[in-house]
Image (spheres, rainbow, N blue to C red):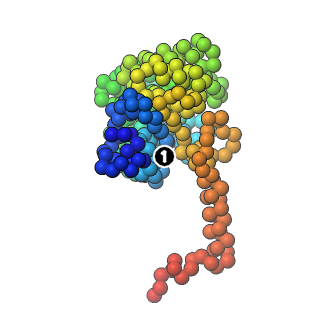
Amino acid sequence: MSVHAAVDGSGAAASRPVTIHDLATARRDGERFIMVTASDASSGAILDEVGVPVILVGDSLAMVALGYDSTLPVTLDEMLHHTRAVTRGVRRALVVGDLPFGSYQAGPTAALHAATRMLKEAGAGAVKLEGAGRTVESTALLVEAGIPVMGHLGLTPQSVHQFGGFRVQAKDDAAADRIVSDAVELADAGAFAIVLECVPESVGRRVTDAVDVPTIGIGAGQHTDAQVLVWHDLLGLTTGRLPRFVKAYADLRSEISAAVKTFASEVADGEYPGPEHTYGG
Ligand code: KIV
């Protein structure tokens, strides 16, 4: 089955849920795919209807949906709440729940506890954890427990204070080598895919060549197996200075403003509600 079955309109196969094995097949077949974030049932349902194979309930929702200036404040309970909403709207896509800052850094046991809740209480099909080192051990334990794990390397936003801001990572050879070896360790520990955020294109290519699981880039150039964007960025809902890698495929912020202004003026003019919106009797 193509991971894009629903997009191609190729029929019955589209109803089968996407699994981590379909993503491995896509990588093997050189089929590039996308992942998009969602934080509620309606965004999840739209992505699912369009045929997006992987939906990430990313902790970026702390910034784009909850108004924080980093991903650090969002709690596991809040992530579970949003993931539950998304899984209620999704029939086919693989839903990946992000484990938030503080829920797994204590080590494999904490990670197992948080990840178990993500699958059991929120219906996610996989979890995402940032970083390497201890996260590699946690990945191995989760995979052994039957929980699919997506890794995340490069600019890992939960470490923003250590990085001193949201900056491009792995700019020198030593740091690039380190990301490649971290990716190999994560893949060896059983991660089914690895997100690479904000690294030079050459690093995206090196990691993709070094591992045999799909790489999913965001600001990692052309040579990853897949690309991910945050819903609000993709649709032109975010304001302010955006990272270079963001491409807005719509300008929904302007469309929403125009729609709300029209609503206000129609109410002011007595044009809405019209007879077609009004109950008789
Ligand atoms: O939280 C998120 O949205 C993410 C993506 C940027 C990969 O981790």
Q: Residue at x 62, y 68 (%)?
A: 263
In the displayed structure image, the side of residue 167 where residue 226 appears, left or right: left
In the displayed structure image, the side of residue 120 where residue 57 appears, left or right: right
Residue annotated with mark 1 = 39
Element type at mark 1? loop
Where is residue 107, by image quadrant? top left
Image quadrant containing the N terminus: top left
Q: Residue at x 48, y 50 (%)?
A: 43
Q: Nearer the viewer, residue 274 or 48?
A: 48
Q: Is residue 85 above or below residue 170?
A: below
Where is residue 115, by image quadrant? top left
Q: Nearer the viewer, residue 227 or 103?
A: 227
Q: Nearer the viewer, residue 38 or 53?
A: 53
Instruction: From the top left corner, tell me how far across and down residue 87 is, in percent.
Output: 39, 47
Q: Residue farthest to the bottom?
A: 281
Where is residue 198, by image quadrant? top right
Q: Residue at x 60, y 19 (%)?
A: 170
User: Is any part of residue 178 visible from this angle?
Assistant: yes
Q: Residue at x 64, y 73 (%)?
A: 266
In the displayed structure image, the side of residue 98 where residue 148 appears, left or right: left
Q: Is residue 109 above or below residue 95?
A: above
Q: Is residue 48 above or below residue 278?
A: above
Q: Is mark 1 within 8 Å of ligand 1?
A: no
Instruction: From the top left corner, tell me how far across and down residue 74 is, in percent.
Output: 52, 38
Question: Disc count in the image?
Answer: 1
Q: Residue farthest to the right?
A: 241
Q: Is residue 113 above or below residue 122?
A: above
Instruction: From the top left corner, tell me how far across and down residue 14 is, in percent.
Output: 34, 47
Q: Amino acid at mark 1?
A: Ser
Image quadrant containing the C terminus: bottom left
